[in-house]
Amino acid sequence: SSLVIMSDSSNLVNRKSKKEDEENAENEQTSSAASAGDQSSQRAESSVKDNPSSSNPSKIDVFTSFVESVGQSLKGAAAEAARPSSPLKTLDLAGIADYIKTRKPKNIIVMTGAGISTSAGIPDFRTPGSGLYSNLAEYDLEDPQDIFDIDFFKENPEPFFKLAKALFPKDVKPTPAHYFVKLLEKKGLLLRWFTQNIDSLEIRAGVSKEKVMAAHGSHATSTCLKCRKKYDLAWITKHLDSSALVPHCEAPDCDGVVKPDIIFFSESLPRDFFVKIVQDFPCCDLLIVMGTSLIVQPFAGLVDEVDSEIPRLLINREPAGPFRAHADAARRPTIPLEVCYGLGIKASHRDVFHRGDCNEGVLELAERLGWDAELEQMIAAGPPTTELL
Ligand code: OAD
């Protein structure tokens, strides 16, 4: 197995470096040959004992055996050099828990999408059947994504506001997965929470505002598209509860359409998002991704901003982005990583894909970390704040 090859190659290196201290290159070659020869002779001798009919090894046998042993060692060294060192003992939640316990990462970045809030009753976008984009037939849209397209909205804001009631439900509660991230913050391990969600459940779970980067904005505030007057959540909520479909600005002589401050397609992402990427990702020592299809850019591309040796975990119902390679590997019978590298099979040395529900995933991780009682306490206590972004 690869372990044997590794220890063989390291023995060879140790032996060599000792001799280099003592002898010149020519002598070294001779003595290495002799020592390999000695080993071969010993092997040959033991085989003689096993097989009384065989005779003493010839010089050719000794030389062949020496060449073979050097070849084996070189092969081992080459395989070792080609294999990137894995920061994880195992490519699963146990490996991630072990990494947190032993390496003590302090700059964990969390990236989330709509899947983290589905158990709170907010639909995601792309799950066939329940996702928002499969339920827009009544809006007669050419492309379901048009509902979040800024040019389409400027021409026809009605479909968006019809949907807004479902999108911004009242009295939603953070999920166990939200509280898990709060727990990371409480333990001083959370560097930043990059979220695509506009539901503000991160803040409801008690995570500090400065730790949350809402990449696609939030519905906590709204802006008049004409005079840029700002409105708060209470104003837009009251409006959504009233019969008028499209909210209009109340500033004198304005009457512009008021749009919640969520980022639509073709709109720029907040400047702060790009500042935080540059600031945070080079320091990231563990990336946890949950509940996203990793389809929408530039957010999806953030997973590649962490250093190539930093472990990445995806907890999701389906594989996404670069975690697909891990999911493919998981379908094969388990092949040790070293063997994959040796045979040239594509395998990740630092990605973990945990297929399943976000809540179930974080509960298992918390249990493996011995944090389950604390997490369950936070869940039972409920949202510590009603404040939004
Ligand atoms: P998607 O709907 O594209 O993906 C949600 C992912 O979460 C899917 O892979 C689901 O399988 C998974 N999922 C759903 N419920 C889950 C659960 N309870 N546990 C685990 N996994 C679950 O949503 P996003 O990736 O967030 O942008 O979508 C990204 C962006 O596309 C949104 O921010 C929005 C949308 O268009 C804009 O509106 C600009």
Image: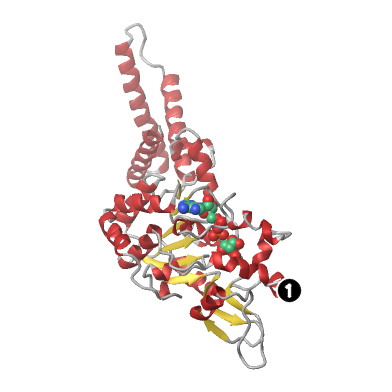
Quarter of the rendering containing residue 28: top left
Label 1 secondary element: helix
* Between 64 and 321, the one nearer to me in the picture: 321
Q: Position of residue 20 (x, y in %)?
A: 36, 45
Location of residue 199 with respect to 60 vertically, above or below? below
Q: Is residue 221 visible?
A: no
Q: Position of residue 371 (x, y in %)?
A: 28, 56
Q: Residues within 10 Å of mark 1 (few under 14, many from 20)?
A: few
- Ligand 1: image quarter: bottom right
Disc 1 target residue: 155
Residue at x-position 35% and y-position 18%? 44
Residue at x-position 35% and y-position 37%? 7
- Tag 1: amino acid: Glu
Is the CB atom of the residue marked by disc 1 within 8 angstroms of ligand 1's nearest atom?
Answer: no
* Between 44 and 24, the one nearer to me in the picture: 44
* Between 245 and 372, the one nearer to me in the picture: 245
